[in-house]
Amino acid sequence: MAEELKHGAAETGFEHQDLSPRSVYGFLVALAVGVVVVAVLLSGIYRAMDTYERSHQPSLSPLVQQTQANTRDVSPDELNTFPQPRLEKDERLEINKFRLAEEQTLNSYGWVDEKAGVARIPIERAMQLIAQRGLPTTPKAGTAPAAGKEKP
């Protein structure tokens, strides 16, 4: 063997084939510049397409009234005249009001139809009454209800 291997002593230093920090920083700077250039190019392309689209819009009839108001802003008067289903202004507030009204209906006495004598009772009381009395049953099909005295 022409060469002897030294197993005990390790060579100190670094590997010369690694990337230098300067080249890594240069790549990161070039990447950032590339991102900025692409963003500017895309912004310019979108502006050019928007300008082209606006210039090629068909002309409106003179009978059409043009309003510059934002159609997303709705006044409270318009909310009441617009048919259901309506868009929500504040979803959390509206669902909380709805849930509160449902809870009040479930847990209070009141009339459903006062003329017909139909009332509602709290849900807890209704469950107690059903537990005491049971559910009403209907006769089986084919059986006649018990009749009283028959008239001649």
Image (cartoon, grey):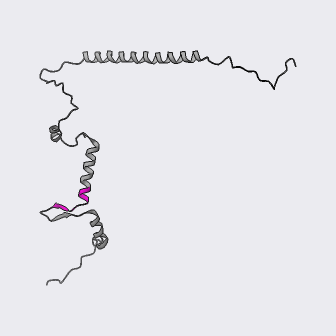
| Of the pair 97 and 87, the residue shown nearer to us | 97
Quarter of the N terminus within the rendering: top right
From this view, report whether residue 56 is shown above or below residue 122.
Answer: above
Tell me where residue 53 appears, x and y as whole percent: 28, 18
Q: Is residue 117 left or right of residue 25?
A: left
> Residue 78, located in which quarter of the rendered image?
top left
The magenta-colored residue range is: 103-113
Residue drawn 46% across the image and 15% down it: 33
Residue drawn 69% across the image and 19% down it: 15
| Of the pair 104 and 133, the residue shown nearer to us | 104
Q: Is residue 128 left or right of residue 7?
A: left
Tell me where residue 37 appears, x and y as whole percent: 43, 15
Q: Is residue 137 magenta?
A: no
Residue drawn 58% across the image and 15% down it: 22
Q: Is residue 152 left or right of residue 26?
A: left
From this view, report whether residue 107 is shown above or below residue 39.
Answer: below
Q: Is residue 110 magenta?
A: yes
Q: Is residue 5 left or right of residue 75?
A: right
- Count of marks overlaid on the render: 0
